[in-house]
Amino acid sequence: MNFTYYAPTEVVFGDDAERHTAEMLRKYGATKILLHYGGHSAQRSGLLDTLRRQLTDAGLEFIELGGVVPNPRLSKVREGIALCREHGVDFILAVGGGSVIDSAKAIGYGIPYQGDVWDIYARRAVPQTVVPVGVVLTIPAAGSEMSNSSVITAEGAQGEDLKRGYTNNLCRPRFAIMNPRLTFTLPPYQTACGVVDILMHTLERYFTRGNDMALTDALAESLMRTVIECGPKVLADPHDYAARASIMWASSLSHNDLTANRDLGDWATHGIEHELSGLYDVAHGAGLAAVWPAWALAVMDHAPERFTRLAVNVFGVPYDFTSTRNTALAGIRAAMDFFRRMDMPVNITELLGGRPASDEDIDLMARKCTAGGPVGRLVRLDTAAVASILHQANTNPLP
């Protein structure tokens, strides 16, 4: 396979890494900065006050915009664009996880663009330049701190929200500052969602039609085994620095194309989940856990060797010499067991607190998911196929 690998983000990793923030901002030419963040956790932890003092002591001007929520909203992006234009911002510092970083990337696209930034996410325009982004990472999950992608939700009436992603190397952060200690106070649910997101970013790339990928497969399998080992550890002991560090670094490596170029992966599960979280505003990682088993069951017969390899090399399932299919099924069950160990849902009914998605909602999600054509590269899924997976995902696909 021919590919291009590009991962230019400079990483500062380790205990107290955030003390280098002003230094990195100066290195990358920032003079007027937007300090962009989410809710109150960064404020309660003292991180924002630390960064404010550091920027002030370094003589760096900055303004602030907080309030980013999970499944980051287009309205906040537009607010940020207007604010940055008014104050002449030339660099955006995202303090948080994937939602904050994605919001920052969208603001970076929108500041120099003369139209509405949603044109870019709706594929009506291609950005030519961007206001650069740097990151102080507090939530390892999305991998947005080293990736070229972002996902934004445009609010609509009566549940017609549109959640759309956009990929362009322009938006890759210039630097990412990662201190595992900043993740100690993450709630267990948010930690578990992040672990699933990391695993799924690797799985999406793992399921490709190419089989001559020995090194890349080995890297992916090692990354997934590490996450599966460390996830339960941090739920049992949130202050396990070594396990937190492994998860934080895995977040970046799972989405910086090290484990296969994004264009070679499947991404159907992500596409389906985007409609699920767009409609119900659920956590992305939890939505992925609820969808993946049904997707896997629907497509496994098209790539039995891939599913068998996952079962044996990642989840430690014994190879069943009488039936490759039984080995693959055992691997899917092992993945579901891991989701349960992380207190994650394995179907939509569990995701939505005991109620299944309605037939009307499933039809809506399937139509929106495939509005641009079939999704997935391992198996091309049309509207009917996506609807079938969603129906299967309503309850346990493999009881």
Image: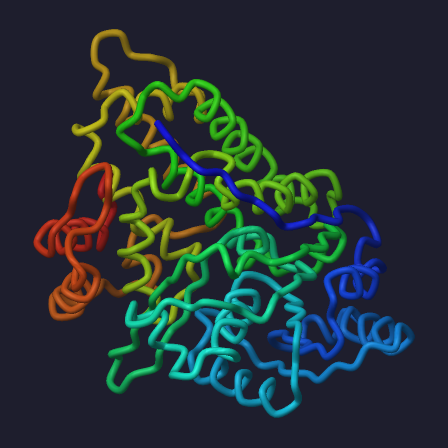
Residue 8 placed where, x, y %? 61, 47
Q: In this rendered view, identify the residue nearer to me: 60 or 95.
A: 60
Q: In this rendered view, identify the residue nearer to me: 234 or 306.
A: 306
Residue 300 placed where, x, y %? 21, 31
Residue 20 placed where, x, y %? 83, 58
Residue sitting farthest toward the bottom:
86
Residue 211 placed where, x, y %? 32, 21
Residue shown at 26%/38% (left/top)?
296
User: Compared with residue 180, is residue 199 higher up or lower down, i.e. above or below?
Assistant: above
In the image: residue 321, left or right of residue 142 = left
Q: In this rendered view, identify the residue nearer to me: 233 or 80.
A: 80
Residue shown at 61%/77% (left/top)?
39
In the image: residue 261, left or right of residue 349 = right
Q: In which quarter of the image is residue 324?
A: top left
Residue shown at 52%/27% (left/top)?
219
User: Compared with residue 30, is residue 85 higher up or lower down, i.e. above or below?
Assistant: below
